[in-house]
Amino acid sequence: MYVWLSSNVTYDLDKLDSLEVYENKKDNSDLIKSTLKTKKGICENYAAVFTKICDLNGIQSWIVPGYTKDFGKLDTTLGHAWNVAKLDSTWYLFDPTWGAGYVRFERFHKKFTFKYYKTNPDTFIQTHMPFDPIWQLKEIPVSHKDFIFNTLTQILNSILKTVLKTF
């Protein structure tokens, strides 16, 4: 399901422009139908289809709302959504949206990756912060403050390295 979804659905930048904060809905049938019809969507579309496929196959799963950071840039203005699924009695983290590619310079670049498939919680928390800490799947969750502070530390270290190179 992850491979098919990440390989066949394209990120819809036009829809992103009209996006409001992600809201976890009980009925995602419209999101799912439009995604399967157009093969386009944003994170909530990817997450809704992923969860529906899991449900149809008897796999327990949830859509996880939160926020992200990429290349040291924290993005709290737009929410993001990804998935957790329970396979063989173990919960795993999935982000089929980020697995499909990436956005740079206001353009979506299709580039499939397994990096966000059954991702280790310690790796996932470096870029994804769920609003509810239980979905970090960590014994000791990272606080929102530490997630944000780590980002600021990365930015300051990057600036410091650049400054030191000039001397």
Image (tube, rainbow, N blue to C red):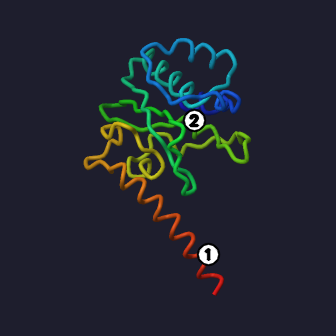
The residue sitting at 55% across, 54% down in the picture is: 73
The residue sitting at 63% across, 15% down in the picture is: 34
Which residue occupies the foreground of this view, 117 or 160?
160
Circle 2 SS class:
helix
Q: Residue 162 carries which label?
A: 1
Q: Is residue 33 above or below residue 2?
A: above
For disc 2, the marked residue is 97
Residue 79 x/y as whole percent: 50, 36
Residue 92 x/y as whole percent: 39, 37
Name of the residue lying farthest toward the left: 139
Q: How crowded is mark 1: few (under 14 residues within 10 Å), some or many (20 or more)?
A: few
Circle 1 SS class:
helix
* Image side of residue 20 versus residue 60, left or right: right
Q: In this view, does 55 lie above or below 137?
A: above
The answer to the question of whether label 1 and label 2 lie on touching residues, with beta carbons closer than 8 A, is no
Q: Which amino acid does label 2 sit on?
A: Thr
Residue 47 x/y as whole percent: 51, 27
Q: Which mark is residue 70?
A: none
Total number of numbered labels?
2
Which residue occupies the foreground of this view, 104 or 115?
104
Q: Nearer the viewer, mark 1 or mark 2?
A: 1
Q: Which amino acid does label 1 sit on?
A: Thr
Snapshot quadrant of residue 161: bottom right
The residue sitting at 47% across, 37% down in the picture is: 94
The residue sitting at 56% across, 31% down in the picture is: 43
